[in-house]
Image (tube, rainbow, N blue to C red):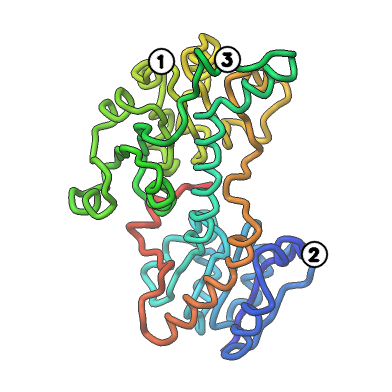
């Protein structure tokens, strides 16, 4: 058994791997890691792939193209040590017996943690209150309060691993949680103890709205002027999904009016330009696409793929298995 790890950026490989994961993989497969610091291209993968039973990819890896698949006579497994595998495999792979997996679950846990942290930051007004203090002000406990998260109406747009983890993390805070997704069934909603809602109902009734749907042509700008207008005065909008799912100009207009607050980890243009109007607003927290960053969860990405590889070899269904239906719903970038 031979495994090719196509990560040439050594700091990235250090981030997503662990000695334990390497040791476990080495216990049942010979490991080849592409040379560090030298870009590993599609042509390089085409040249090498015939020798390997498994290919591990991550951010910046070459794509397993249809041409590469035509040479991959021994290939049994492709594991992506990151989230969306959409840019890294050709759909032709799903007409083969090759198992395809991603390490989305650890990243979902990290992103959910980032999302909930942003909810608390925004719902407690930490940014504006800290700025008030810096400007010489204080807080009048006799007449002022903050919304907070405990007992809040929370609306989650999208039913995936991230939103399900957010639901789990919010359980101790007695929130009423509504979820909108075309893929959410009544039984799934009952299992999570959330209320299945239309998008309109969710927007109208939520104190906090958090976006978790995937970015596809069908979801581009799905939250725009009309949707933001439905949200309650003083509501908090959180986006840790993808920037282009919203109409950013429409959100900026609402934020400028002071009617809404926001915590944003993703933007239509990344890196966010220093000239962006978002950076000049006091009622929005802007972060540089870091919600999925977490030292513990990031270090488990390879372990997740190694476990799935072992599972696939044993004829079992890996946790992170991707089939064509799920692949077609993935964020393309």
Above or below for 141 versus 46: above
User: CA gap, disc 2 to disc 3?
Assistant: 59 Å
Q: Against 83, is 144 above or below?
A: above
Where 290 falls versus 256 (above or below)?
Answer: below
Residue 270 x %, y %: 64, 35
Q: Earlier in the sequence, mark 2 or mark 3?
A: 2
Q: Secondary structure at mark 1?
A: loop
For image coordinates 55% across by 78% down, the residue present is 54
- Residue 296 location (% of width, % of height): 62, 62
Viewer-proximal residue among 78 and 177:
177
User: In 3D space, how far apart are the residues under numbered discs 1 and 3 (Cα atoms)?
Assistant: 21 Å
Residue at mark 3: 140
- Viewer-side residue, 323 vs 195: 195
Q: Nearer the viewer, residue 180 or 296?
A: 296
Tag on residue 233? 1
Residue projecting furthest to the front = 142
Residue 38 is marked as 2
């Amino acid at each position: 058994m031979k495994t090719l790890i196509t990560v040439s950026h050594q700091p990235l490989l250090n981030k997503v791997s662990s000695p334990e994961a390497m040791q476990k993989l080495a216990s049942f497969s010979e490991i080849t890691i592409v040379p560090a610091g030298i870009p590993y291209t599609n042509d390089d993968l085409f040249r090498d792939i015939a020798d390997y039973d498994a290919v591990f990819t991550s951010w910046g890896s070459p794509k397993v193209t249809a041409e590469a698949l035509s040479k991959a006579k021994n290939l049994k497994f492709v594991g992506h040590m990151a989230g969306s595998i959409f840019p890294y495999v050709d759909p032709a792979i799903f007409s083969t017996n090759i198992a395809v997996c991603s390490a989305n679950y650890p990243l979902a846990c990290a992103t959910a943690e980032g999302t909930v942290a942003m909810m608390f930051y925004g719902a407690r007004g930490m940014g504006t209150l800290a700025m008030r203090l810096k400007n010489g002000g204080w807080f009048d406990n006799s007449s002022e309060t903050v919304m907070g998260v405990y007992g809040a109406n929370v609306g989650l747009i999208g039913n995936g691993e991230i939103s399900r983890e957010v639901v789990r993390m919010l359980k101790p805070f007695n929130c009423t949680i509504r979820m909108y997704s075309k893929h959410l069934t009544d039984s799934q909603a009952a299992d999570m103890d959330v209320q299945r809602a239309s998008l309109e109902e969710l927007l109208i009734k939520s104190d906090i709205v958090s976006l978790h749907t995937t970015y596809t042509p069908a979801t581009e700008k799905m939250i725009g002027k009309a949707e933001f207008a439905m949200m309650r005065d003083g509501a908090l909008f959180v986006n840790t999904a993808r920037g282009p799912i919203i109409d950013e100009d429409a959100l900026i207009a609402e934020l400028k009016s002071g009617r809404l607050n926001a915590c944003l980890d993703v933007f239509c243009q990344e890196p966010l330009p220093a000239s962006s109007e978002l950076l000049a607003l006091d009622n929005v927290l802007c972060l540089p696409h870091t919600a999925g960053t977490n030292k513990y969860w990031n270090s488990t990405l390879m372990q997740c793929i190694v476990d799935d590889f072992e599972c696939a070899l044993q004829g079992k269904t890996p946790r992170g298995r991707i089939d064509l239906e799920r692949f077609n719903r993935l964020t393309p970038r």
